[in-house]
Every structure is written in C-alpha cells, then in structure tokens.
C-alpha cells in the first residue's frame, strides 16, 4: 500500500484543517488507519485511529473533541478533520495503515506509512 498525506498548511490558532490520506496499490478496507504526528525534536506520537469499517475510532487525549477521523473506503481515502487548532498541534502529520482488526495506537502495529504533511499553527 502506498499512502500519500496532504492538506497540511499554516493556520492561526483556533483555525481548522482537514488532512487527507490517499491510498494506492490496495484497498484501504483491509486496514485500520491511523494518524501520527512528530513535532521538531520529539518522537512520533499517536493521534487517532479508525477501524477498517469505520465503526470504532480512538483519539489521543489532547485532541479529543477537536479532531475527527473518518474514512471513505470506496474512495480509498482517510481524513483527519482538525478544529480548534493550537500551537502545540504543530507537527508533521503521518497517516499509516495496519492490517489488524482493531484500533491500534502503537506505531509498531502499522506497516505502511505516508510521507507526512506539515501542520503549523501560529499563536
């Protein structure tokens, strides 16, 4: 599976962005999908994940109520809608695919990774 993340950019605090992750090579319906982020000088961390059929989602505590993950298996797309952005959300955001049946939060469960898209939130 090849993953391509897009939709990042520069936004003011309180603003919104919608990230997209497009897949090619295989259908995304076989995979749980996750979003991770990496701030400068920090390790990559979990943001959100969604089950292969979209019935279960899970979020890191700091983004709950602000971010929404969704997917369109028919279009081979996964989204991360980010509202109420804060400067601490600034990072490179990565989408990833896992062939597990659940909603994994550990990066080690993910086999395929996109190249990342930069999100910068100004104060």
Image: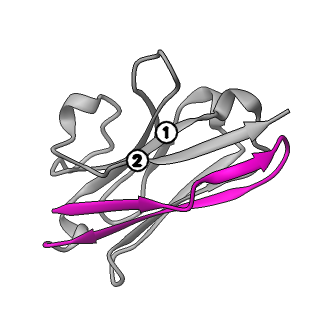
Q: How far apart are marks 2 and 1 (CA)?
A: 6 Å
- Whether 15 is among the magenta residues is yes
With respect to residue 74, does 44 lie above or below? above
With respect to residue 80, does 89 lie above or below? above
Q: Are marks 2 and 1 in contact (CB under 8 Å)?
A: yes
Q: Toward the viewer: 104 or 4?
A: 4
With respect to residue 66, does 4 lie above or below? below
In the image, is 98 to the left or to the right of 4?
A: left
Image x and y of residue 97, in percent: 25, 52
Identify residue for label 2: 116
First-in-chain label (2 vs 1) = 1
Identify residue for label 1: 92
With respect to residue 42, does 83 lie above or below? below
- Whether 50 is among the magenta residues is no
Q: Residue at x 71, y 45 (%)?
A: 66
Image x and y of residue 78, in percent: 42, 65
Image x and y of residue 29, in percent: 24, 70
The residues colored magenta run: 1-25
């Amino acid at each position: 599976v090849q993953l391509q993340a897009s939709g990042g950019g520069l936004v003011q605090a309180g603003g919104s962005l919608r990230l997209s992750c497009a897949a090619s090579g295989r259908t995304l319906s076989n995979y749980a999908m996750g979003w991770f982020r990496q701030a400068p000088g920090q390790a990559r961390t979990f943001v959100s994940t969604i089950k292969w059929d979209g019935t279960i989602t899970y979020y890191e505590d700091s983004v709950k109520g602000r971010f929404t993950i969704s997917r369109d298996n028919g279009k081979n797309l996964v989204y991360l809608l980010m509202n109420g952005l804060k400067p601490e959300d600034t990072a490179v955001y990565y989408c990833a695919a896992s062939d597990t049946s659940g909603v994994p939060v550990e990066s080690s469960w993910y086999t395929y990774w996109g190249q990342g898209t930069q999100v910068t939130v100004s104060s």
